[in-house]
Image: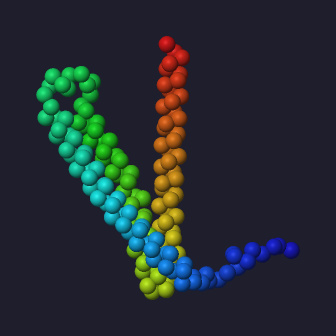
Amino acid sequence: MKAHNPITQLEQLILNADARIFLKETAKWAFFIAILGIFGIAFMFLGAIASFFVFDALPQASQAQVPFDMGLATSIFYLVMALLYVFPIYYLLQFSTKLKKALNTKNDEVLANAFEMLKSHYKYIGVLFIIIISLNVLTVVAFALGAFAI
C-alpha cells in the first residue's frame, strides 16, 4: 500500500489573515526591488553609452598603453550585464503584480502564475550564480596553471 502525503492531497490551500498580510508585504517589496532593478538597467545602458564616448574622447597618448579599445570593451561589458539583469527583474516584476492581483481577486490560478514567476526568478539567479562560480574557478585554475608553467 502506498503512503499518502497529506500535503499533496490538498486540493486547496487556505491562506489565513497573517499569510495574506505577509504576501501583500512581500509583493510590495518585490515591486520596489523590481523598480530599482529597472533603474539599474537604465543606468547600465547609460554607462555603456557614456563609457564608449568618454574613452573615445581621451587623448591618444593615454590610450597607447591599452592594447584594445577600452571604450568599446567597457560598453560591451555594461551591455552584457544589463541584458543579463533584464530577465530576473522582469520575473520579479511579474511576480509582484500577479501576487497583488491574486490577493485582491482571490484567484488561485493567478496566484499559481505569480509563484511560477518567482520560481523562474530564482531559477535564473541560481543558474547565473553557477555560471559565475564556474567561470571564477576556471580563472583561478588557469592562473594557477600559468604560474606553474613559468
**Residue at the (50%, 75%) spot, across then down:** 22
**Residue at the (26%, 52%) spot, across then down:** 43
Q: Which quarter shows the N terminus?
A: bottom right
- 45 relative position to 132: left or right: left
- 39 relative position to 60: left or right: right
Residue found at the very far right of the displayed protein = 1
**Residue at the (52%, 64%) spot, across then down:** 119
Residue found at the very far bottom of the displayed protein = 105
**Residue 109 seen in render:** no
**Residue at the (25%, 33%) spot, across then down:** 70
Give x and y (percent) for residue 145.
Answer: 53, 22
- 141 relative position to 44: left or right: right
Numbered label tally = 0
Q: Quadrant of residue 27?
A: bottom left
Q: Is residue 75 above or below residue 32?
A: above
Please tell me which residue lies in front, 17 or 41: 17
- 9 relative position to 28: left or right: right
**Residue 81 seen in render:** yes
Residue found at the very far top of the displayed protein = 150
Q: Quadrant of residue 58?
A: top left
Colour scheme of the rendered structure: rainbow
Give x and y (percent) for residue 125.
Answer: 48, 54
Q: Is residue 119 above or below residue 28?
A: above
Give x and y (percent) for residue 105.
Answer: 45, 86
Give x and y (percent) for residue 8.
Answer: 69, 75
